[in-house]
Structures are given as C-alpha cells and as structure tokens.
Amino acid sequence: MAYKLRKNLANKKNYGGSRKTSAIKYIVIHYTANDGDTDEGNGNYFHNNVVKASAHYFVDSDSVTQSVPDDHVAWSVGGSKYSNCKATGGGKYYGKCTNSNSISIELCDDKKDKKIYPSAATIKNALELARGLMKKYGIPDRNVIRHFDVNGKSCPAYWCGTDAKDRKWKAEFLDRLSSGDGAGKESGSKALRASDLKNMGVADIIKKVGALFTEDQKGSGILASVSLAQFILESDYGRSELAQAANNCFGMKRSLSGNTWPGSAWDGKSVYKKPTKEHVNGKYVTVTAEFRKYPDIAKSIADHSAYLLGAMNGKKKRYAGLEGETSYKKAITIIKNGGYATSPDYIGKICGLIEKYNLTRYDVSSGGISAGSVSSSGNSAGKEPTSDTAGYYKKYTGKSIHINDVFKAVGVPEKFRGGYMKRKPVAVRNGIANYKGTKSQNLKLIKLAKAGKLKKI
C-alpha cells in the first residue's frame, strides 16, 4: 500500500445505518470541489460537524481517510436526477446505483493553485483504493462510475459533461483500473487474452474462461451460462480470427446501429479491420468492417453485457427483463426477441451448448444452479430428480400480510429478512429483478408463498 490509511469516522448524524457488505455493487468517484484541501481536513470536518452528507473515503496525494465504515450507508449519491441529463449524458445509472449499494470515494486537491484538479499521486492512491475495494467486494470495473453517472451532477467536474472530459475520465482513471489487482484479472496474474486459449482443448478453455463470466454476472445480472454459451458459439471457443486478433469474442462492431449505452468497456478508439460480407440492396457484398478491439477477454465480456443491458429500441430497452432473469431459456429468448440474432435456431443452439457442457455451474446462484437448468441427461445439473417442492420454501398458511412475517414463517433465512435490500436476492430469484420493496412487489412474493411456489435462494 503506497498511501497511509487512517480512520476518522464522521458524526453519526451524517450517515445512515448498517448494511450487509454483500449489498455493495458500485464504487462512485466524487471530487470535493475545493482548491487546496486534504483527506485529513475533510475527515475532521465531517467528524466535527453535522451536515447530513458523507462519503466513505477521502483521498489526497499521500493518504486516505475513511469517514464512513464500508458496512454502513453514506449519504452521497441521493437526490433527484438532474433535468439536463439528456443533454449531458449523465444519470444513466439513476435508480440502479444508490446510497445503499455503493461506496463513495472523494478526491481532494491538496495543491492550492487557483484551479481544481487532483494530483497524479492522488489519482494513483484513489486507483489503488478502488482496486482493493473491487477485489474485496467482487465489483467489476464497469461498476466504478462517477457521481455524474448516477444523477447527472457535474462531479467530478473535470471528468464529466463533455466528450473531452469523458475521454479524460477513461484515460486518467477508468482504463487504468485493470492495470492493478482489479476485476477481470485471473487469480492475481495477467489478464486472460484469447491468444492464451489458442492451443487448449475445449474443456480446458471453458474451465479457463468460466470464472470471468461468473464475475461478470455478479455485476451485470446476466446469467453466466448464457453469456458463456454465446462466447462459445460466436467466437469458436475464443479461437476465431476476431477473438485472436482483437479479443473481440462477440462480433461487436465499432458502431452498432448508432446505439450507445452506459458502462461500455471499450476505449472508444481501438479497432480491428477485417473483410466481411454484408447484405446490401438484396445481395451480399464484401466490405471492410471495423470491429472493437479489447486488451483482454474480460473487457470484451463486460462491453457485451453493457450492450445487452443498455441498448435501446426507441425509448424502450431492447432486451428489457434480461437483468436478473434466472432461467437461461427465458434469458436467451429475451435476447433473441430483442433482435440480437436472426438465425431461427439460435435459441436452440445456445441452450444446447449450456446443456452439453453443464454451463449452469458457472451461474451465480445457490449451488451454482439456475432456474431452468438441465444437464444433457435431462436432470438438473446432472443430479437425481427431486420432488416438486424441493426448490421452494414452505407454503404459507398464515394471515399476516407483512412480508418479513411471511418470509420468517416459510423458512427464508434471517440474512434475507429485514430491509428491502436484504430481501432482494429472494425477489430476484423469483423474477422481480428491479425489486424496491414496494407494496405490489411484496404482494407478489406473498402470493407465491401462499401457493408454495416461492423459490429458494
């Protein structure tokens, strides 16, 4: 650790209650907007004053102060979405990244020179801090975002609001995350590239890349089994020309029908050119197409998932409902119906690969098994068939309409009871991907419980 880490907790009236660290999904980068301040100074200010705002960490050129414990909620990204987001491009994570599921890092400017900009040492320390948190909580680099990305606030002002500032954000911070022990690395070693797979057998390739798809699902909510099957089909197990030359494992072109989306892992400039056949005016012609080029496989996976989550069809999400879907059959149907592939047997091919190689073992769910998963023998993950009720909580026969009472009565573990963030994994498992604890959502869960159909985590 290059910096000195100190703890100076804020006044308790400046931050929220406790939370499970498993709820942490995002790291949000801020700036203090001061010329000539320090992490120590900010730590003291929030310790000694009641301002009803906070951040977990303050960083300057030689040290870091922790102001709010990781397992507590900082009040740092709340508030309404700015009205100019459509013009600035901000607010793309509004409603997804919240105080409850994020860690906030404030960059100080400890050089008083009539301009506000972090020193190289401050940026380096913030990168090291972020990498450590990413590794500790399993946060992919696509989920390291700016306050600007949450609700459109111009923060950090020097890294948002214009194309030039967006490029600075990527060049000076975001793209440098993967140069350390961040997400997308393999067991602390170098990032995995398609060229590493060239002389490997199929089983070894799947084993090698499987963990990357599991990590991606933790951040994206897209089943690892589905993305991994797409990787196999679309890149020939990472051995296609495009994969080998550009680590592009999903045929992602430089421009996809003018579509843009938040969280892209592509650097915006690296391309690989290759001849391809396009259908133009009723006939096929050969053109030179530009495809995105990535430094490693993890970046290709991340960009592909960001596309599936953010691509639009007019004013609607092209693949709405994909995030959090636990059935691979339903997930690939959403992808196919959204226009991803025109082949009539695309769904069958993907499902066939999932079943042939038992790819559901890489899914993030209890025991590695996701809803709708079967092995080539027809049984769930190759196991012996079980009774119809084995995967469900007990049937609810009580009269209470309070969701936590119902959860307790049917046997939902205590760690999944309490606030809505605790209950969310159960809700997601039961098809409510955007669970916020609303009355209608809770009634849906209670209805399932009364029918004995509330799926177990």
Image (cartoon, grey):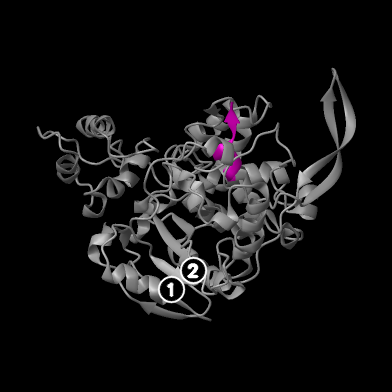
Q: Which is nearer the eye, 20 or 450?
A: 20
Q: How many neighbours does mark 1 have within 10 angstroms: few (below 14), some (14-19), or many (20 or more)?
A: many
Q: How many neighbours does mark 2 have within 10 angstroms: few (below 14), some (14-19), or many (20 or more)?
A: many
Q: Residue furthest right?
A: 286
What amino acid does circle 2 point to? Answer: Cys
Residue 203: tell me if it is visible: no
Q: Which is nearer the eye, 328 or 85?
A: 85
Residue lying at 73% horizontally and 38% vertically, measured from the top left: 255
Q: Decide whether residue 310 is among the magenta residues.
A: yes
Q: Earlier in the sequence, mark 1 or mark 2?
A: 1
Tally the numbered discs.
2
Residue 353's quadrant in the figure? Answer: top right
In this figure, which residue is indicated by the disc labeled 2? 108
Q: Which is nearer the eye, 49 or 431?
A: 49
Residue 227: tell me if it is visible: yes
Residue 113's quadrant in the figure? Answer: bottom right
Q: Residue furthest left?
A: 399
In this figure, which residue is indicated by the disc labeled 1? 39
Q: Which residues are magenta?
A: 305-313
Residue 340's quadrant in the figure? Answer: top right
In the structure shown, which secondary structural element does the residue marked by tag 1 occupy?
helix
Q: Are marks 1 and 2 in contact (CB under 8 Å)?
A: yes
